[in-house]
Amino acid sequence: GISLGYTSGPTSWLSTTPSLSTKYHNATTKTITNRQSPSEWAFVFLMADCDPTKAQPAYRGILYNIMAATYVLKYQDPTSPTDVVVLVQLSHSTTFERLLPAEEALLEFMKIKIRYLPKPDKVPTFYELVMAKFHVLTMKEYSKIMFLDGDVLPLCNLDYLFSSKSLGDIVLHAMYDDPINAGFFIVAPRTSELNLDELMQEWNHFRSLPQPPSVEYRLWKGEKGSGWDFYCGDSDQGFLLYWSLFLQSKQSVSIIIGPNIEHYDDLPLGNGLQRQPSRVVSSSVLLEASCLPSAADRKGTWAQNAVTEPMVSNLPFYQDFYHMVGYSKAWEYPPANWHASLSLTELTSTQ
């Protein structure tokens, strides 16, 4: 079996200390599983503020969800060419510079690549924790990246969202009462004209304005909204909206909003003016590619039960993943009875 126990300090398996540079592009990378033919696409997850010395660390719930998601994304479709990558940022207070050997072994078994981010030099704020996900914009070895929060569980393989001709370079979606949900998005880092440092400078300048540019949008149930006071409008969700509607120049943007998709193909107007959609189409264009059957055909299945919002349970895209809410989130309650050891034989037979 693989012991998930921990030691109180560094051991021989530790590598050299990653760079502590605050420059986003200086993240230290350790790739556990090498591919002979590099993939153009990647599913990317984030585990931040990880402290392996805790007996039941909250991040382990996210690690388990990443393993479950990888099983759905990859093992149920062995032909999928897409890499799975986890970004790991250790807690500023831990003496460790890596995850536990057992945790790395589990990720290796699932053929998940690891990229270690610089360890923060102080206790990170909520803003800093959620903004760490935008390290995906530095991963220019991929033409497209799908970022999934640790509380997102795909219900089927999602490769079709990379290849769909009905979607732009950047794919966002509205959810709940927010015009953008930053728990699930697609970016094209290789063709982005601004690097992450430049984007962060633009965003920080925007956040410092006494009166930010006005913004209008539609929510997933069809109602109109405006302003930046939506949830996380001053952090990751606001950044995605600002970047996509005010800063992007040549990359096309698609925002899935309930039953519709807004496409932004035209160049931004500049001078703080909001980019306007060039066309709006029905999200039914994704129906053939959507990897789950219709809600009527899957009634009573676990996938049907996972989609808790009746309005979108039969919509393309929304029916293909489960976004945990409230106390159902993977990090809220680490399993109290998690096993101290996990057999690779059991994992292999389950596979």
Image: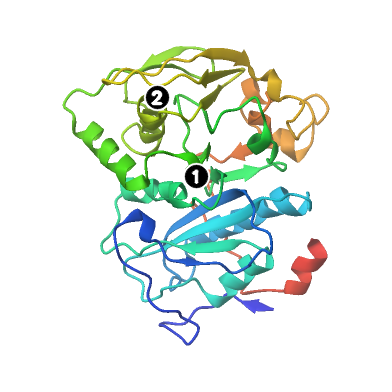
Q: Where is residue 181 in the image (x, y as percent from the top left)?
A: 48, 33
- Inspect this view and state whether residue 170 appears: yes
Residue at the outermost left position: 210
Three-letter amino acid code at the position of disc 1: Arg
Q: Residue drawn 36% across and 27% down?
A: 230
- Residue 16 lies, with reference to residue 250, above or below; the image says below
Label 2 sits on a secondary structure element that is helix
Amino acid marked by disc 2: Leu
Q: How would you rate the neighbour count of disc 2 (Cα within 10 Å): few for under 14, some for 14-19, many for 20 or more? A: many
Image quadrant where residue 110 sits: bottom right
Is 222 left or right of 271, judged from the image as shown? right
> As rendered, which of 341 and 71 lies closer to the eye?
71
Whether residue 334 is visible, yes or no, is: no
Q: Which of 82 and 270 is in front in this view?
A: 270
Give residue 89's position: percent from left, percent from top.
42, 61
Q: Residue 190 carries which label?
A: 1
The residue depicted at 80 percent of the width and 62 percent of the height is 350
Cα separation between marks 1 and 2: 19 Å
Q: In this view, does 79 lie above or below 220?
A: below
Q: Which of marks 1 and 2 is nearer the N terminus?
A: 1
- Which quadrant holds the C terminus? bottom right
Image position of 268 (left or right of 205): right
Provide the secondary structure element on which disc 1 rests: helix
Render colour scheme: rainbow
State the quadrant of the N terminus. Answer: bottom right
The residue to which callout 2 is attached is 245
Reply above or below: 279 against 247: above
| Residue 219 picture location, percent across and down | 48, 19
Residue, x 80% and y 24% (percent of image)?
296
